[in-house]
Image (cartoon, grey):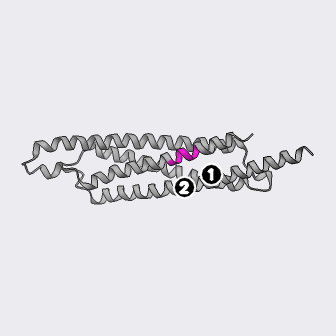
Amino acid sequence: MSQTPDTSSSSSTLRAIAQTFRLIGWISFWIQLSLGVVSGVILLANSLFSRNPSGPGSNAGTGFGILLEIGGLLALGAGIYLAYRYTRIGNQLQSSNPSNRPRKSESVQVLRLGLWVNLVGILLTLLGAQAIVGSFTLRALSQGQFIFSPQANQAIISGLDMFVVLANIQTLQAHFAGLVASLWLLNRINRRE
């Protein structure tokens, strides 16, 4: 008789955790996917419509920063996959067959992987942001020297350059959303006893 309330409580807790996994997983998935697509489109447009990379207006810092940003986007792709995986874990937790449910340790391992993927993505994207903004700062500082010369047009920071900074910020936001989702779910699953 004492097992019935305990089993019912355990079942409702498991159901609540499963619903949380599904909800947070889908929210994280769509936020990361939408911000990642926008960032990818911006970087693609930058590569298609930017000035001649070997011209005098180019800077090696910008190229290295964009390379790091692409690394951040690749990490974001892994984060998007893991967010989708959270939804599948939520579905598995709702299974009526206990052998189909993932163990707590397996779920925690996936969540920790999500934390690490998003932290690495944040690191790559922040390093890329520093390289890009540093390169733009150097370019802006050099503009004063060429105000009345033919080289002045090559040193100006364009709107397309600023879109690269925007893409970088959106990638950071996407990784932050993935990080928050993983931490939230990790906290929720660790409260289950």
- Horizontal placement of 84 versus 105: left or right? left
Compare marks 2 and 1 and give the one earlier in the sequence. 2
- Res 144 label: none
Circle 1: is it few (<14), some (14-19), or many (20+) Cα within 10 Å? many
Please report the residue visible at 9 percent of the width from the left and 47 percent of the height from the top: 147
In-front residue for pair 63/112: 112
Residue 156: x and y in percent read: 18, 50
Please report the residue visible at 58 percent of the width from the left and 45 percent of the height from the top: 182
- Res 86 label: 1
Please report the residue visible at 80 percent of the width from the left and 47 percent of the height from the top: 9
Q: Which residue is mark 2?
A: 29
Is 181 covered by the magenta stretch? yes
Q: CA distance from mark 2 to mark 1?
A: 9 Å
SS state under label 2: helix
First to last magenta residue range: 177-182
Give yes or no for contact between labels 2 and 1 (Cβ–Cβ under 8 Å): yes
Residue 139: x and y in percent read: 21, 44
In-front residue for pair 116/93: 93
Residue 56: x and y in percent read: 17, 48
Please report the residue visible at 72 percent of the width from the left and 48 percent of the height from the top: 102
For badge 1, the amino acid type reads: Tyr
- Horizontal placement of 76 versus 56: left or right? right
Residue 137: x and y in percent read: 24, 41
- Horizontal placement of 138 versus 172: left or right? left
Q: Eyeballing the image, is 4 above or below 48?
A: above
SS state under label 1: helix
> Could you tell me which quadrant the C terminus lies in?
top right
For badge 2, the amino acid type reads: Phe
